[in-house]
Amino acid sequence: MLGLFAQLGRSRKDPDVKMDMPTFQSRLSAMPVRAQYTLQQALAGLAAQAPNEKPDKPMLLKLAEHVAIRFALDSYERGELRVNAVKQLLDRMNSEIEALRKILGSQEELMASAGIQVQAYTELLDQEFWEQVPEENKKEVLTSDEAWCVPPRNVRAFLEDQLRRGELKTCNEILMKYAACIELEAPEARRTTAIGLSDLAELYGSGDGSALMEAIRRLGNQLALEREPELQTLVGAAFVRLSQEAASKRCYPAMQQALASLDSVEAQRPGSTQSLRPRIGAEERLPEFIEEALRSGHLADGMTEILGLMPKATLQYSTNRFGHCGFREDCELLGNIVRGLGDDAVQRLIETLQTAPANEAAEVVGLLTQLAPDSVEKILPVRLSQWPRSAHDRTVRQLSSAPATNRAHLLVSLYDSLDPLIRPLAIDEMGMSGEPDCIPKLLSLAQDDATHNFIRLKAIESLGRLRASGASPELQRILDARQMWRWTYPSELRIAAAQALMRVDPSVGIEKISAIGIDRKDLALEPTDPEPNASVIRQRRYARLKLSRNIIGTTTNLRENFRLNIPELNLSGGIGAGERHLAPGSLLILKLSHGVRNIKAQALVRGARPQAMAFEFVDMDMEERSRLRKMLLELGGLPMPAQVTNRQRRRGRVAFTKS
């Protein structure tokens, strides 16, 4: 029949080759009845499609293609043709149609001349054939060992239709069966299946993950067994594509299967996975996995196992990320991640604390206080004696993330090893911990007249925060002590003692304040109490004040000093916009100017906002602090205490690992 079309085509292009209508009709009537019926069906199908067809393909060529498809479909429906033979039949028919295509000249020649790749006509015929197969037959084929015979485009269309109907079980069954075809004996079956699996990757990732996991497992097995180079490449590409789909859909069990399969393949064929592992990109996606866990607040099923397969990268990222955490839940989750890596990971952190340079070692303190606090208590005093002040500062800030009991115990035990300028920060942390275990140490500092006044003031404030009833006699002594016609202790110490006594013993505190004549306005700026069970790691020690007009701060200890324009300030520090930015932990000697008065203080640089830099006071003479209090009362008015519940999590912060 197709030969008849070819002769008819030649007669249209070559006037010397004649075929009149009677000759064509006689040739047509001589064909078998079944062939005539097939042609009739093809013509009917072609007529039905004609209104939608573009006029760029010769009608005779379309008729030949319809005849080929109709014949294959008729043979399949009669049971004369097995599924896996359809492609062979269409391929054979395509070779006959090819002659007709060359005779007529065609659209694909124009496309090829334009550099556009044209899909093979056998595949096009195959796709059109399967589009016309009844649905019940499609399902039967797709759930058999011959599923690979169905073109991926048709498999996709069928599965998407089933998904719209909610037939999830059927979809999963088909996906499982299709993946199993990768292990068939016929090379053509494995080749077609590998290509199809890559095309259908998104559908494998749309279910519950079981089909995706099974497909990756089978591809991994076949990758280890495959010996034909071309098929190795195709199977490897499908394995990578499905593994990437598992990563993008956060299907951690499937990712675990992918990495386990790679290890198995590597064991059987050493060196064969070197190009595959980086293409999967599991380690590159690790920050995304951990950040997603922090956003959700829990570890998804299978995530611990997948991170356990990348212990070094997981430990490095978790350690760096811990230093950027502002909330206890995040710190605890990161601690659980590292704990899930096993004892080896904890031991590596301990070794880092023991032997690494100061800046690197200080970064593991926070994690280790959750995982091995005894090791921190044992190692840190020795190491602190070797570290610069900036590392001491970082250590105290890392300790602020520890559970309250561990934090209090470690701060007390490490206090004497800390740099003198960092000790006030440690005392603040003791008071904010809420743990009574700190009281004896704080009381000894408050009672000792040899203690530096700024540290003593901080100890008194912390005793008040802890409601240390045993401190009441000492606080009263500080308030009452006189030398002839003046008070023994500076006004700032007496104000701090009065504020603490009001918390420790309110009735006595009210009586004392009335007797000693402290102006109640001076008591307005007081230390804030810690909020129990607060999520934030570092609560504010004092309410911050928005100044009615900015003040100017000038550095005096740098090679190139600069000015800060300060709109927010309190008794513990503030934020200012300056011409330069310094690294957190840098020491500044500041001169704050207000009218004709100057206030001197030492401060450490904290984190920087855009166009601004935060700083925290670490030492100040009591007279300077008294002037600071008066200035704040004048420019800031009454404080508005900040609520930790108003502090929101800032997401999307990724800790980049250091090279």
Image (tube, helix red, strand yellow):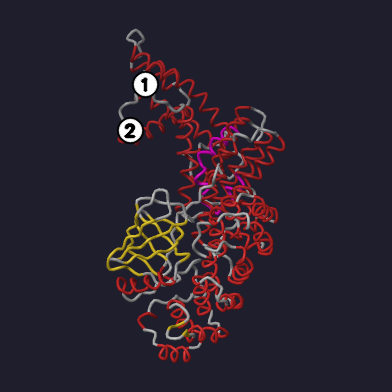
Relative vertical location of residue 606 with respect to residue 493 in this rendering, above or below: above
Task: Identify the residue at the far top of this view.
Answer: 16
Query: Where's residue 430, x and y in %?
Result: 55, 72
**Residue depicted at x 49% and y 56%:** 585
User: What segment carries the magenta color?
Assistant: 190-215
Which of these two is toward me, 578 or 74?
578
Q: Is residue 295 above or below residue 239?
A: below
Residue 191 part of the magenta-drawn span: yes
Q: Nearer the viewer, residue 336 or 178?
A: 336
Farthest-out residue, front: 484
The kind of residue on which mark 2 rests is: Glu
Can you give x and y, in whole percent of width and height, for residue 410 in the image? Answer: 62, 67
Tell me the chief SS of the magenta region: helix
> Does 199 lie within the magenta span?
yes
Horizontal relation, residue 226 to residue 612: left or right:
right
For mark 2, give the secondary structure: loop
Label 1 to label 2, Cα distance in Å? 15 Å
Point out residue 393 in the picture as x, y percentages from the top left corner. 53, 59
**For the residue marked with disc 1, what is the amino acid?**
Ser
**Callout 1: SS:** loop
Q: Quadrant of residue 114?
A: top left
Residue that mark 2 sits on = 53
Check disc 1 and report the residue beneath it: 106
User: 590 or 70, which lies in front?
Assistant: 590
Which residue shows up at 47% across the image and 20% down it? 96
Crowdedness of circle 1 by 10 Å Cα count: few (<14), some, many (20+)?
A: some
Task: Decide which of tag 1 and tag 2 comes sooner along the chain.
Answer: 2
Q: Quadrant of the C terminus?
A: top right
From the viewer's perspective, is the residue at label 1 or at label 2 nearer? 1
Q: Measuring 57% from the left and 47% from the top, which residue is drawn there?
A: 212
Q: Position of residue 434 (x, y in %)?
A: 55, 76
